[in-house]
């Protein structure tokens, strides 16, 4: 069935970098916008980044702009999030999510999430 | 960009109806018909319940319905069931390729 599987989370020191991956399966990955959305412990959802179908357009939340980079490899059906200069407040579960077809403001397929903990 | 406001909690008995509110501004909820609602059970990923204010994805029961008036969007769950107990988040397009999420409302089914 349609599936997204995140990986790459872990414990990292402040100021360091980490790369998350999201493997997509059972759908045509290359025709969908994709998101990274995070959720800090006990908190609500926060969108992090959005990328267009072909990767030519990328958008970021102000909280991560200049530090995080979203990318994708359509030949590998994989979405990435390169995180640098990590801060304590970046600690969260990070989800990748697929949008509805032709509607980038709603996400109808979500991964199970990968946990990033920023701590010294 | 501030988040739309959602009451932190709501409750209802099985069979009853409950309505969640999501109050934003004319720059987000009031300015676009791009409001979505998500259901999240503890430890699980969110699930899309409503998009474009009123539309239901396939597989979502018609007990779930959405509406909007001015800067406030609403999600109504009718015929409450035990499995509806979860947290509900609204989201809205906020212009300039920004998305905002509300703080969430925890629903308790009594």
Image (spheres, coloured by chain):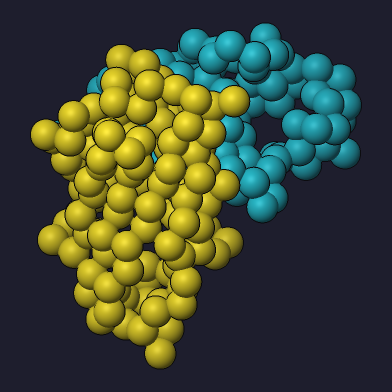
Chain colours: A yellow, B cyan
- Residue in front for this viewpoint, B92 or A68: A68
> Residue at position x 27%, y 79% from top?
A16
Q: Nearer the viewer, residue A21 or B109?
A: A21
- Expressed as whole percent of the image width and height from the top left, the position of residue A10 reads 47, 71
Q: Position of residue B20 (x, y in %)?
A: 60, 30
| Residue that appears at 17% across and 35% down | A55
Q: Is residue B47 above or below residue A31?
A: below
Left or right of B77, for residue A19: left
- Looking at the rendering, in which quadrant would you find the N terminus of chain A? top right
Count of number-bearing discs:
0
Q: Is residue B95 left or right of residue B52?
A: left
Q: Picture coordinates of residue A56 (x, y %)? A: 11, 34
Locate residue B70: give its quadrant: top left
Of A3 and B51, the residue lying toward us = A3
Please state if A34 lies on the left or on the right of B75 as rendered. Answer: left
| Residue A43 in sight from this viewpoint | yes
Please identify the quadrant where the C terminus of chain A is shown: bottom left
Q: Position of residue A20 (x, y in %)?
A: 37, 58
User: Is residue B106 toward the left or the right of residue B49 in the image?
Assistant: right
Quarter-of-image position of residue A66 = bottom left
Decide: is A93 above or below B70: below
Which residue extends farthest bottom? A120
Q: Is residue B105 visible?
A: no
Q: Is residue A27 above or below residue B23?
A: above
- The residue sitting at 27% across, 34% down in the picture is A74
Q: Residue drawn at (45%, 65%), measured in percent from left and top?
A: A9
């Amino acid at each position: 069935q349609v599936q997204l599987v995140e990986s790459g989370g872990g414990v990292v020191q402040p100021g360091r970098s980490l790369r998350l991956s999201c493997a997509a399966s059972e759908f045509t990955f290359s025709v969908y916008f994709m998101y990274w959305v995070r959720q800090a412990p006990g908190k609500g959802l926060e969108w992090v980044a959005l990328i267009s179908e072909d990767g030519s357009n990328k958008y970021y939340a102000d909280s991560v702009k200049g530090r995080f980079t979203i990318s994708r490899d359509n030949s590998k059906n994989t979405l990435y999030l390169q995180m640098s200069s990590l801060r304590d407040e970046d600690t969260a579960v990070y989800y990748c999510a697929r949008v509805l077809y032709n509607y980038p403001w709603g996400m109808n397929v979500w991964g199970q999430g990968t946990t990033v903990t920023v701590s010294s | 960009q501030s988040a739309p406001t959602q009451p932190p909690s709501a409750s209802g008995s099985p069979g009853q109806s409950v309505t969640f509110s999501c109050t934003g501004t004319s720059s987000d909820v009031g300015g676009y018909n791009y409001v979505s609602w998500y259901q999240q059970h503890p430890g699980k990923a969110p699930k899309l319940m409503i998009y474009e204010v009123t539309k239901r994805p396939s597989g979502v029961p018609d007990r779930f319905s959405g509406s909007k008036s001015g800067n406030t969007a609403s999600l109504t769950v009718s015929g409450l069931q035990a499995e509806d107990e979860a947290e509900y988040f609204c989201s809205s397009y906020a212009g300039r390729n920004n998305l905002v999420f509300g703080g969430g409302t925890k629903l308790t089914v009594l």
